[in-house]
Every structure is written in structure tokens, then in C-alpha cells.
Image: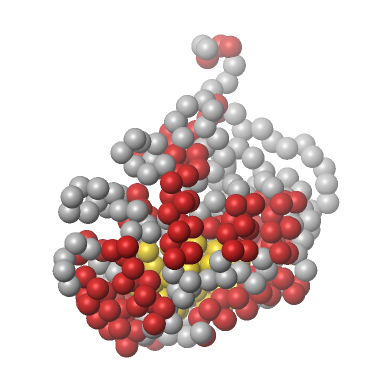
Amino acid sequence: MTKKDGLYLDEYMPRSELVVERVCVEGPRFPVIDFHTHLGSLTDGEETEVRERIARHVDQLQAIGVEHVVNQAMRWGNELIGLLKTLAPWADFFTTFGGVDISQLDEPGFPDMVEDSLKRGVDLGMRGVKIWKNVSLGMKDRSGRHIPIDDPRLTPIWDTAARLDLPVLMHIADPVAFFRPVDRFNERFEELQHHPDWSFCSPELFEFEELMEQQERLIKNNPNTVFIIAHMGSYGENLGFVGECLDKYPNMHVDMAARLAELGRQPYTARKFFERYQDRILFATDCFPSWLEHMKYYEFLETWNEYFDYSSSGVPGQGRWKVYGIGLDDGILEKVYNLNAKRLLES
Ligand SMILES: [Zn+2]
């Protein structure tokens, strides 16, 4: 196609002419615990500067109705000590989940190392474990093989977490389209064009379906460990699958971080899912405080608004579609916004 025949995809920005009632949302109906956030580099640097930055960050979150956040830090050892020290003045506002040094997986002392590391973390105030997708989609063991997430060598982590009452938040996969060829049939084509490194379509890596099998075995084989599978149980595109797993495994929970676009394009299915699994879903965004972005989450959960943008950027980042609210009742909203999180954090 030549330019004179039409528009390039990235130039196409249609404006909706739909005229429907739209309820304006200016905050959440209940105080919010955001279960999946990252402070990232906010905590790095000169002490006074860091303190000011964090104080500002907390103010911004409180202004948009967030009363508490879980900082998924993935740090251990001295880095974790430093982080918890930095956050100590806001101990009521931040809960921190720490990581485990999985690069030592093949060392004979790995189980003891895990136990020591997690115990030390708990003594310092760590309240959970975060495992990132670098394990399932990046790391290799000593023999050069990728590590399945249900690998028995990882069991000491799940056992120790269960013993220490630490919930484990796992980010295992990514959107299914990231595992498919980046071609004209890919529903996340534009996003993958902008971020080619987000594609996991490679014969070297586990396929999405393999990861889901590993995920299910992990949860099944470790019934005493509380797992929170991030990003709608890794499979927001298939809530039927996620629901079946939740039915089978009472130790499984999900967070909704960064899956507003996914949920909002299937409002009937999503509403049924939230009704049925209202005790197992955690509010989460995975994003920095932003009035515009957070209001979209609240709008989705609380209203019946139709066909609205799920993000404030010109071309929506996760695909060219709009979303619909699911008008949840107060009882469900309060559980999703904070009661489910409180229960997990207090256990
Ligand atoms: Zn995250």
C-alpha cells in the first residue's frame, strides 16, 4: 500500500461520536490497597532527596484514594535492608515483598540460603515474596536450560514461604499475544512494534501454554503456599481458565494489575468473574500514581459507563479497543479494593 491509498495505522485516531450517559468518577468508593506497585528508582539516591520524593509519592497516592500499597521489591540481602530502612518512616503506608536470589539455584546450599534470606527479610519487616517473569522467561540453570516455574529445585522457596506465612506474588507470563508471531494477526502488533523486546515468540523459550501448565502444577503441588498470580492469573484473555484454577486451588489468588484493557473489553465475562471470585481478586495497578489512570480503574469497577478509553494516551497502548464498566456492588467492591488484601497481609 502506498501512502496515497490511505492512512498508516499509526496515523489513524478515530474519535468516537457515540453519545451515551457517562458517570464521572472522582475517586474510589472505598479506600484502596494497591497490591502490586513498584517504587523502582524512587528509593535510590541521596537521602534527603529520596525522602522528599517518597513523601510526594505518598501524597499523590492518598489524593487518588489509595491508603496503602504493596511494594513488590524483589530485593534481598543488603539491598532489602537499605530499602526497608528508607521506607521505615512510612511503615504504615508501604508493605514490602522481597525477592530470592535464584541465581544460586544449583548451589548445594540453596535451600538453606533461601531459608536464611527469607527469615532475615521477615525479621526486618518483609511481608511476602515476589517472583518475577525473569525466572520463567529469562534465566537459565547451570546446564544452560530454562527453568520451569514448577521445577522441584525451587520448592524450598514455596516451603519456606508457607512456613513463614509469606504470600508469594508471581509474575509468570505476559499477554498471550506476546508469545505469538509479530504479524498482521497479532492483536498487540503496535505495542510489539514499539517494544520488540517484549516479544517472547521464540523456539528457545517456553510457549505460553507450557507456562500455564507449569503454573497450574506449581499451585497444585504446593497447597500450603499462598500464591497471588499477578495480572489476572497470567491469563486475563481467558477468565474461564483462571476461574477453573481458582475453583480447584484454594491457595490461589489473582491481582488485576495492568489488565484493565483486558477486563474492560469483556465486561459480561469480567463481571461474572468478579461476582464469583470476589474473595480472591486483589486491586492492583502496577503503575505510578496518576489521577487519570487510576480513575479509569475505578470507573471500570464501579460504573456502567460504555466504550471509554482505558488509558490516557492518544493511541491506547495495549490494543485499539475501548472498555466498559462492570458496575460492581458495594460488597464486592470493598473486598476487591481492600478487604481481600487485608486478609492476606494480616495472615
Ligand atoms: Zn509488576
| Residue 32 left/right relative to 330 | left
Residue visible at 57% across and 59% down in the picture: 245
The percent position of residue 168, horizontal first and vertical second, equals: 43, 70
Q: Residue at x 64, y 52 (%)?
A: 240
Residue located 39% across and 68% down the image: 130
- Could one spot residue 240 in this view of the protein? yes
* Residue 219, horizontal then vertical, whole percent: 47, 64
Q: Relative to residue 17, is residue 26 drawn left or right?
A: left
Marks counted in the figure total: 0
Residue located 72% across and 71% down the image: 332
- Note whether 274 is above or below 137 in the view shown: below
Q: Which of the two residues, 272 or 296, is positioned nearer the viewer here?
A: 272
The answer to whether residue 148 is above or below residue 202 is: below
The image quarter containing residue 321 is top right
Q: Is residue 49 visible?
A: no
The reply, left or right, for residue 3 in relation to residue 80 is right
x then y, percent, for residue 310: 62, 50
User: 144 or 180, which lies in front?
Assistant: 144
Specify the quadrant of the image occupied by residue 99. bottom left
Q: Nearer the viewer, residue 210 or 292?
A: 210
From the top left corner, tell me how far across and down residue 117 is, in percent. 26, 78
Q: Residue 73, located in which quarter of the rendered image?
A: bottom left
